[in-house]
Amino acid sequence: MEIAFGILGQTAMLMHGNVDVNWAGPRPRQVLTALLTAPNRRMPLDVVVDWVWEEHESPPLNAHSTLHQYAARLRQAFHEKSVPAQVSVAKGGCLLEVEPALIDHVGFRTMMDKAGRFREAREHDRALIEALAAIRLWRDDALSDLRTERAEGWRTRWIRSEWIPANAFVVTEQLAIGQAEVAVRRLAELEQAHPMELSFAKLRIRALAEADQPAEAADFFRAAYARYREAGETRAAEQLRAVNEEVLIRPDRMIPRRKPAAPDSGEHVIRHLPPDIEDVAGRADLLAMLDACTTDTAGAPRRAVVVVNGGPGVGKTTLVAKWAHRAERRYRHGAVMLDLRGDSQAARADAGEIIDTLLSLLDFPVDQVVNPIARAAKLSALLARRSMLVILDNVRSTDQVAPLLGVLSSCTVLIVSRWRLKSLSAKLTPPVIEVGPLEDRYSSSLLTRRIGPRARNEAAGVEELVRLCRGNPLALTLVAERASSRAGTRIGTLANQLRTADMLLDLGDEGDWPGTSLRSAFTLSYQVLRPAERRVFALIGLHPSAEVTGDAIAAADGRPAPEVRRSLDVLVAAHLIEHPADLDRYRVHDLLHLYAATLAAQLPDVDLARRKMFEFYLRMVIDAYRLQVPHKSLLDLPPMVPTEWTPRLRTVAEARQWVLRERTTLMGVIAASEGVLNTIAYAIPAMTTEFFQLQGRFPDAIEGLTIAVRAATAQGDVGSLASCLNDLAVVHMLIGAEDAAERCLLRALELVDAHGIAIGGVTVRLNLARVHLHAGRAAEAAAMYRKTLPSARALGVPLVCASAEHRLADALVEMGGHDEEALGLYREALRRRRVVGDATELLWTHIALGELLVRLGRLSEASAECAAGSALVEASQDLPTVMKLNTVLAQLRHAEGDDRAALRHAHRAVDLANRSQHATGQARALSVLATIVCDHGNPDAARKLWRDAAELFRGRARTAKADAIEALLAELDARGPLVPATREGEGDTMAMPSPHLRILRGNRA
């Protein structure tokens, strides 16, 4: 079952087989946790607050506004992860719309229901497998992100009604199929967590009796009985006594004891297994699944073929060997584990060699039978009279073992392989057992146990080692051995050393052949690949992130995409990469990615392959940019390697989604290009910044443009350098860092003036004026705009002229007293923008005109401008602009007396601001909403909204606007309760706005 959300532990998004618990900040995760307990049901706002905010925490002043913000962040996270879910906030509460089956606790219940149906059909082995799959969904303490009273209640109910019964179900089914010893071990673990759970105590008596341990059962009963009596649980004590009498005292009710049958006299018993090892951490459920897959309902060994799969170093052989030692006494004629050398440099073992080996182990004189077919028949006849376990380790392909399956049909056969063996696996029921990386808690436990007391004293170093090893048991073992053998080295120092890829990959190889290291383990899988697949795997090492598309690899490889995808499928089969749910997306484990990078460095055409891969992303960014801003010109792009390129993106929405989805990869390409492909290092940030600003990802925009500035400097490209400095200044300005913005612009101005770049000079000066306006210095901004406007008009570039006129009008509106001039400038900008036809720019000017006209009381003209803007919304699809339109429409409808429509538009503006994570837009929308709410006779709610708006303005360094709101609040507080004035035509009362309020209505960002 595919699970997308997990709350049985830290709140996680489970995507592509990976658990991500850090996908958002703590508070949005907590809100989602609460909503996941009741999907598709609207949860009242006060209930959500009770779920999320603990008693010692101050609840939000405005729950509706605060939860709106968190819902916006959740929607953003869902969009980034392509999770089919939606969250919304309304006055009636919060609603999470999601398919319930995608949530782990719902999936848990569904799996247990299915297990129950198997039990009713007396298919106990299948019931156990399904129940174990449900149990594995539990990762840690349920709802561990929440510690409120409501969360504690839900957690207690879930443990009582779901978790404990499910574990009791598992134990009961283990007893039903004869796995009494496994049941005893599981119950011992469960009783540590639930020492007074009566159902577990009853089952333990039964399990001990079934496992032929009556003395232990009696001892356990006496101790548990006394414990219940001391706790005053007399009823529980008597129930336990009844079970004890039923199982251990009354002979007519005794559970039959199963004893391993002794082999017939004279029959040879094989014991050919590697040495037993200590308990395998984090693999209890996999061991239980092996038990379930290899025994029938009576607990006897089943004639079955089970495939155990997993990538290199994940511990497949260790797991199977551990299980074999636990299970071998079920097989009265023995257990054997044979290495087929499928992943070795030595020649692979074929079916004939395996048959001869087994005959020899059975003391049959092999040389008496020359014909290989006759040998196979003889082995089959010998095994038919025996109960044996045969493990075939290191299998390369189905054809290596297919001839053996008929010969071994009377045995339990385990096939261990790094390869998926698809044609074989498709025929097997139950499914193949996949061995994956260890969870962090088990990785930490393994390191701590093997390193010893030092590990407990250096927890931070152990945590870093766990991060580096990424759950790979071979890596963890090698790291633990290094730490143990070098007691004088601090664990933190060792972790620092292992951050070097070669050091980590070669750990364990100390010149004593054959060495065991991650590199040698990975090489065994790599060397059996064909040349085409080897090249594709190495090319993945060039990719800057661990998730890659087939198109990107095909661009670097040079072969047609279908051929490259076939090679990628082979790598998936070899467990060298994973194929997540998305059709054309592949993921590589971090350690294998490091190994692939070392292989990529050895490619003869490594530089050309890297260039073609990175140019693929550059071409995709160009496609996206042209769709997003079709009227803006591109930087002077570098010459690219010729290719038969066809645009992949068709719509603006598709372009934005692609940039968002590939954001991590694009940032990696930018960083990896610096100093290697500098033109790409500054071309990609120049175009992606447009998207990052829309998505509110200002840190990404700054990081990319900072690299771009260094790359353009190194390349000596003055025009690109000035352009990148200009763009970097705009982003700094938007986050309130005006000083940094001004420094960038002044440096850019020196460059464009020194090299006579006229359009650059105008653009930079316009942005310098914009910084003044953003900082609240409207007069300085207006003066600079006036000075620059003639130069802008002289250029004859409509977009630049329109921008200069529009922004001068903004400054004049902010100053006040220049309304008619501002109207004329807006209309001139509108005329020029109609010539260009950019829907977003046109919409922005219509909004500015409408807002000014509302302020002047010319409502019919304002309505016409807003209507013209509304007609452009579909073509624009720009959330911040549509948000601003709804803000102005709210002001207009409020001025017209239609407060129902005004509130609708104001709430829509707040919602859009939250969705776009546009803090200034949020503050502006909240200010307008506060005005409407205050005028509607609810000053207390208005105060809360204004405080939130002021906090947002101040957080974005819009201090002038924050100060104006706080001055208004101080004035209102000084007046005391507002006395509403009656509005004409309504029974409701309205408060007359103060001068500060009128200023807030008219302000332009």
Image (cartoon, rainbow, N blue to C red):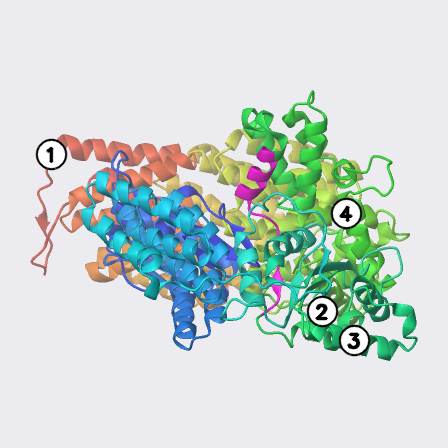
The residue under label 2 is: 421
User: Magenta includes 433?
Assistant: yes
> Disc number at residue 403?
3
Residue 107 against residue 344 in the figure, above or below:
below
Front tag of 3 and 1: 3
Stretch of the chain drawn in magenta: 431-449
Relative placement, left or right, of 900 versus 454 is: left
Residue 944: which quarter of the image?
Answer: top left
Relative placement, left or right, of 892 versus 384 is: left
Q: Residue 892's spot in the image, x, y percent?
A: 28, 57
Q: Earlier in the sequence, mark 1 or mark 2?
A: 2
Comparing 330 with 906, the one in front is 330
Comparing 70 with 754, the one in front is 70
In terms of secondary structure, where does tag 1 sit?
loop
Q: Earlier in the sequence, mark 3 or mark 2?
A: 3
User: Magenta includes 48?
Assistant: no
Q: Residue 840's spot in the image, x, y percent?
A: 50, 59
The residue under label 1 is: 976
Front tag of 1 and 2: 2
* Labels 1 & 2 near each other (Cβ < 8 A): no
